[in-house]
């Protein structure tokens, strides 16, 4: 149990990230009144620090926290907080010094700002993106700011072009470990369907012109997306795309960005139209050799029955999708998160019928690799979104989840 976070407002109010040295940061919306954002840092030698309240406005009802941690254990947190309109705030944790005071990230306070995402490189630089409503019609657009360690935040910039006139949806952002390339993705309507967009950030050059990640006008992109980055600068974008209109059967699609080549052709990762499928938050990850792994939840059959599905791409195309774990017939969705160690072994944690479960992929087993049987991690009440990270060269993993309004942590060794 992560006692320093206190009682959660809901079982979906936890954010968690860890680095390869086993240091971690967790943040959660506290269930007390007011609903403040509380953060804690984990060090393998000393455990979790005392929880620090990041938003000190006593009237705040904060929400949607996002966090990241660098190679030295410094962290960045962003969240939305109502101050008349809703704004985005940030705080930075400096190892050995603690958390900075909360400050507003958005500079346009005419309309609401929210749904932030943040990413850090190994040196402690960061990029944050968020959804900003702008005049004259409070249309949502995508904004971004770049943080340089030792300097601070740069100017807030709109990164979806003026020609992108449809309503934008919450973005995600990732930064390569060396800080040279950042990528933001989001969904945006054109009045008929959602399209999936991306914008690239280059250190020293700034943001490049945004473009579509997919060009299939027979399928409309959805608002559920995922983004992951490899150590060698590849990006994997996952997106839910519906068959023709915005609210029909949804399939999971993927696209890979390769340095020097750009985005490839978006591909449908599954063809099961008996029910919709959606890429899970945290549904993509990379091995050190550049192999991309993708996960999604698949609704099928009678009632609300779901399966956790997986495929991988080692450079010669996506393999046939396979099920991981057991059918989930309780009506719950098998939200998951996955991480890969330096040997290519994958550990995935996900919601099961009894709480939180895991499975491990061994790439050396058989010709196509093999998943282990589903293993119970914790028997819980109503589970929240699980998160997992590899924390050392031995392949040990650290996972967080919630049971009802109580946050937990577990180690896989």
Image: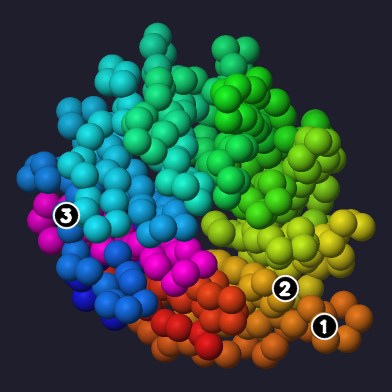
Q: Residue at x 44, y 61 (%)?
A: 17
Give the residues drawn in magenta, as a range. Answer: 15-40
Q: Is residue 346 left or right of residue 53?
A: right
**Residue 28 lies in magenta, yes or no?**
yes
Q: Is residue 124 above or below residue 23?
A: above
Q: Is residue 123 visible?
A: yes
Residue at numbered disc 2: 344
Query: In the orientation shown, which residue stands out farthest toward the left?
Result: 58
First-in-chain label (3 vs 2): 3
Residue at numbered disc 1: 364
Q: Position of residue 402 (x, y in %)?
A: 36, 73
**Residue 289 lies in magenta, yes or no?**
no
Q: Is residue 192 above or below residue 270?
A: above
Q: Secondary structure at mark 3?
A: strand
Which is closer to the viewer, label 3 or label 2?
A: 2
Residue at numbered disc 3: 53
Callout 3 environment at 10 Å: few (<14), some (14 to 19), or many (20+)?
many
Q: Could you tell me how far apart the alpha carbons at marks 3 and 1 are, in whole angstroms? A: 45 Å
Image quadrant in which you'd find residue 196 = top right
Q: Position of residue 157 (x, y in %)?
A: 46, 20
Q: Could you tell me how far apart the alpha carbons at marks 1 and 2 are, in whole angstroms? A: 9 Å
Q: Are marks 1 and 2 in contact (CB under 8 Å)?
A: yes
Question: Is residue 45 or residue 283 the one in the foreground?
Answer: 45
């Amino acid at each position: 149990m992560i006692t320093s976070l206190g009682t959660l407002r809901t079982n979906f109010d936890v954010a968690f990230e860890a680095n390869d040295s086993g240091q971690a940061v967790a943040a959660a919306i506290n269930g007390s009144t007011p609903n403040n954002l509380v953060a804690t840092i984990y060090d393998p030698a000393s455990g979790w620090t005392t929880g620090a309240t990041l938003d000190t406005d006593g009237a705040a009802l904060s929400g949607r926290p996002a966090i990241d941690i660098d190679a030295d254990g410094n962290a960045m947190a962003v969240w939305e907080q109502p101050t008349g309109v809703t704004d985005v705030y940030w705080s930075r944790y400096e190892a050995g010094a603690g958390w900075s005071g909360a400050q507003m990230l958005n500079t346009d306070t005419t309309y609401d700002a929210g749904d932030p995402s943040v990413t850090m490189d190994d040196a402690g630089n960061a990029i944050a993106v968020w959804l900003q409503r702008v005049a004259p019609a409070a249309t949502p657009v995508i904004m971004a700011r770049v943080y340089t360690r030792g300097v601070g935040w740069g100017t807030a910039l709109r990164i979806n072009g003026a020609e992108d006139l449809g309503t934008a949806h919450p973005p995600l952002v990732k930064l390569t470990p060396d800080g040279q390339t950042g990528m933001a993705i989001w969904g945006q309507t054109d009045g008929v369907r959602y399209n999936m967009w991306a914008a690239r950030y280059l250190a020293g050059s700034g943001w490049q012109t945004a473009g579509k990640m997919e060009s299939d006008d027979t399928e409309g992109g959805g608002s559920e997306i995922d983004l992951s980055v490899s150590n060698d600068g590849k990006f994997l974008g996952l997106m839910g795309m519906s068959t023709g209109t915005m609210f029909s059967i949804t399939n999971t699609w993927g696209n890979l960005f390769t340095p020097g080549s750009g985005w490839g052709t978006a591909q449908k990762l599954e063809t099961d139209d008996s029910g919709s499928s959606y890429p899970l938050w945290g549904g993509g990850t990379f091995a050190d050799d550049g192999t991309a792994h993708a996960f999604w939840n698949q609704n099928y059959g009678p009632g609300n029955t779901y399966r956790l599905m997986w495929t991988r791409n080692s450079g010669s195309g996506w393999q046939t999708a396979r099920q991981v774990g057991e059918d989930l017939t309780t009506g719950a969705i098998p939200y998951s998160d996955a991480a890969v160690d330096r040997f290519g072994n994958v550990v995935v944690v996900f919601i099961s019928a009894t709480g939180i479960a895991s499975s491990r992929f061994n790439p050396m087993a058989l010709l196509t690799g093999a998943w282990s049987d589903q293993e119970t991690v914790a028997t819980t009440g109503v589970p929240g979104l699980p998160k997992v990270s590899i924390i050392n060269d031995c392949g040990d993993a650290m996972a967080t989840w919630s049971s009802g309004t109580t946050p937990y942590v577990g180690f896989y060794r």
